[in-house]
Image (tube, rainbow, N blue to C red):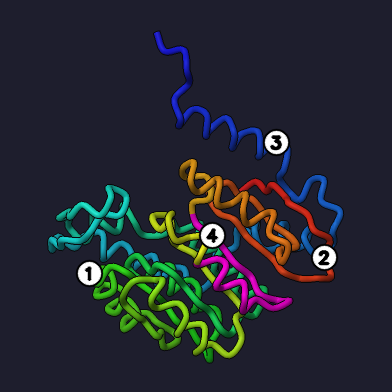
Amino acid sequence: MQIIPKISTLRKGSLLYRSIRYRRGFGVHSPFVFNLITKVIEEKCSYYSFYDIELLRKQLLFREEKITYPDWQNKGELKTRSIGEIVKREAIKPNHGALLFRLTNYFKSKNILQLGTTMGLSTLYLTSYATGLKCIALENIPEFATIARQAFAKEGRNPVDLRIGNYKDLLPEALKDISSLDFVFFNTLYEQQNNLWLFNECIKHAQNDTVFVFEGIKANREMREFWEEIRICPEVTVTLDLYSLGIVLFNKKLHKRDYIVYF
């Protein structure tokens, strides 16, 4: 007889509670944040770019070529999987990608930095809302970067400056090369030992309208502790906890506040 509920059961219970307590901007008094929640985060409309990106995902899922890469989830142990298996396991979820698109579109982000491309689908979502965008994408797994480059060549609406290597080595130069930091997507779930350093480096270049988005803020204890560090950071004004994603704003016109949002 199982006394302690399964993790999946606890997660479903938490999401159900959020759906009842926090949907449609319930309890949010800031007009700016209320509009962000109701018109961007909870929006369900499908944009023109989504079909092409998801069609590319389907094509990748059927690719059976095997590649060997370090699996950071298992302490860098080498794994050999098909491209399709890796996309299914690692690529951004469609609803998360759609939210990235809506956020960059809403904030009209022109200079975008991404840490972790995982096959490039998230990058396409980040950079598809308009032309004339600048995006620097950092990837620490060369095998993933190869697939990402193919994705950019096929569906990219903007050129992507893809750089391969250790994030701590690549980030300082990338930050120098971006004139103003508008949007940063931290897809760094397996960089737990470096996440705080990466965040602190990026925050030095954050401006009033800069937006940070973090993947996997509740994935494990280390990520939950990392999210708490972000929340209490003096430079941060507003955080939005979407359970699987975290959004951080630096707008000094907003009161410092942490919100929980159903997503």
What amino acid is at disc 3? Ile
Q: Earlier in the sequence, mark 1 or mark 3?
A: 3
Assign a secondary structure to mark 1: helix
- Point out the stretch of residues depicted in magenta: 198-215
Q: Position of residue 3 (x, y in %)?
A: 46, 12
Residue 105's disc is none
What amino acid is at disc 2? Leu
Count neighbours of disc 1 (C-alpha within 10 A) and say few if under 14, some if 14 to 19, many if 20 or more.
Answer: some
Q: Quadrant of the N terminus?
A: top left
Residue 143's disc is 1
What is the distance, in whole Å, between disc 3 and disc 4 at their CAs?
A: 24 Å
Assign a secondary structure to mark 4: strand
Query: Which residue lies under the disc numbered 2?
Result: 254
Q: Earlier in the sequence, mark 3 or mark 4?
A: 3
Verify whether residue 150 appears in magenta. no
What is the distance, in whole Å, between disc 1 and disc 3 at their CAs?
A: 42 Å
Q: Position of residue 213 (x, y in %)?
A: 57, 63
Query: Which residue lies under the disc numbered 4?
Result: 214
What is the distance, in whole Å, between disc 2 and disc 1 at their CAs?
A: 42 Å
What amino acid is at disc 4? Phe
Residue most toward the top?
A: 1
The answer to whether the residue labelled 1 contacts the one labelled 4, judged by CB atoms less than 8 Å apart, is no
Query: Which residue lies under the disc numbered 3?
Result: 20
Give me the residue at 53% from left, 79% from top. 112
